[in-house]
Every structure is written in C-alpha cells, then in structure tokens.
Image: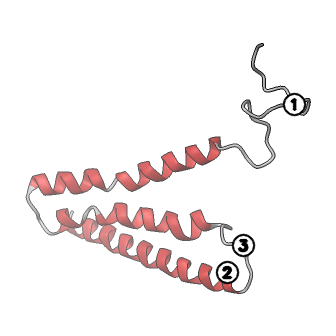
Amino acid sequence: MAALTWGIVGIGALFIVAGVYGRFMEQERVRRGADALRFRLFRVWLPLVFGVAALGKLPRALSAPFPIVALSEGLSLAPIVIIVGLGLMAARKPRPGARTTTAPDPAGNSGESQ
C-alpha cells in the first residue's frame, strides 16, 4: 500500500513539473506572438490541479496521524472543485456580441413599461 501511495505522490510531482514547464513554454510562445489563452487549460492548469490533488496523499505516505491525513485528502479535492466551478461559470458567460436581456433594442426602447 505504501508503494502505491508514494507512486501517486511521485506522479503528482511530475504533473506539477509538467504544468510549470507548460507555463514557461506558453510565455515563450506569447513572446513570439501566439495567442495567450490557447490551450491554457490543458497545458498549464490541468496538470497543476492533478498534481496538487495527488500531493494530498503525501501525509498518508509519511504515516501522519489520521486527522492530518483526512484533512489533506479532503483538501486535495478542492482544486478540482474550483476548476470545475470556474469552467461552469465561463460556460455561462455571454460572449462578446451576444444579445443580452439588459441591453436596449436597436429602436432605443429600454424594455420598461411606461
């Protein structure tokens, strides 16, 4: 069981290194004129989130007391929940040029009754 836990911690560290490397490569591409937001989720944030979640197993691998292990494993899910929540909020955000209910119509009416 301990070997499996150390394996998960090692994979988490590799994910974090991959996320940091992706961030440096993204900065280099932006200097060359590329779009800054292209594939940011998959190249930078997704490996970092998985790495932080996997590092939540570190106290278990170090044989820490149960309350610390329970707290760390509970907190290791927080980055995933935050990223999913932000993704859902971004999906709801109206895109530029989209018609909203608060914008006045082309005739100049505000939509309020008189």
Question: Does 108 appear above or below 26?
Answer: above
Spatial separation of the CA atoms under disc 1 and disc 2: 42 Å
Q: Residue furthest front?
A: 114
Structure colour scheme: secondary structure
Q: Residue furthest left?
A: 65
Q: Residues within 10 Å of mark 2 (few under 14, many from 20)?
A: few
The label on residue 94 is: none
Q: Nearer the viewer, mark 1 or mark 2?
A: 1
For the residue labelled by badge 2, is the local secondary structure a helix, a strand or a loop? Answer: helix
For the residue labelled by badge 1, is the local secondary structure a helix, a strand or a loop? Answer: loop
- Left or right: 32 with respect to 54? right
Q: Amino acid at mark 2?
A: Val
Dot 1 corresponds to which residue? 108
Dot 3 corresponds to which residue? 35
What residue do we see at 73% from left, 47% from top? 95
Quadrant location of the N terminus in the rendered image: bottom left
Q: Amino acid at mark 3?
A: Asp
Q: Residues within 10 Å of mark 3 (few under 14, many from 20)?
A: few
State which tag comes first along the sequence, 1 or 2: 2
Residue 55 spot, x, y in % from top left? 30, 66
Residue 42 spot, x, y in % from top left? 58, 65
Which of the 4 quarters of the picture holds residue 107? top right
Q: Nearer the viewer, mark 1 or mark 3?
A: 1
Which of the 4 quarters of the picture holds residue 15? bottom left
What residue do we see at 78% from left, 22% from top? 111
Dot 2 corresponds to which residue? 30
- Left or right: 76 with respect to 68? right
Q: Amino acid at mark 1?
A: Gly
Spatial separation of the CA atoms under disc 2 and disc 3: 6 Å
Question: Does 60 appear above or below 93?
Answer: below
Residue 6 spot, x, y in % from top left? 26, 71
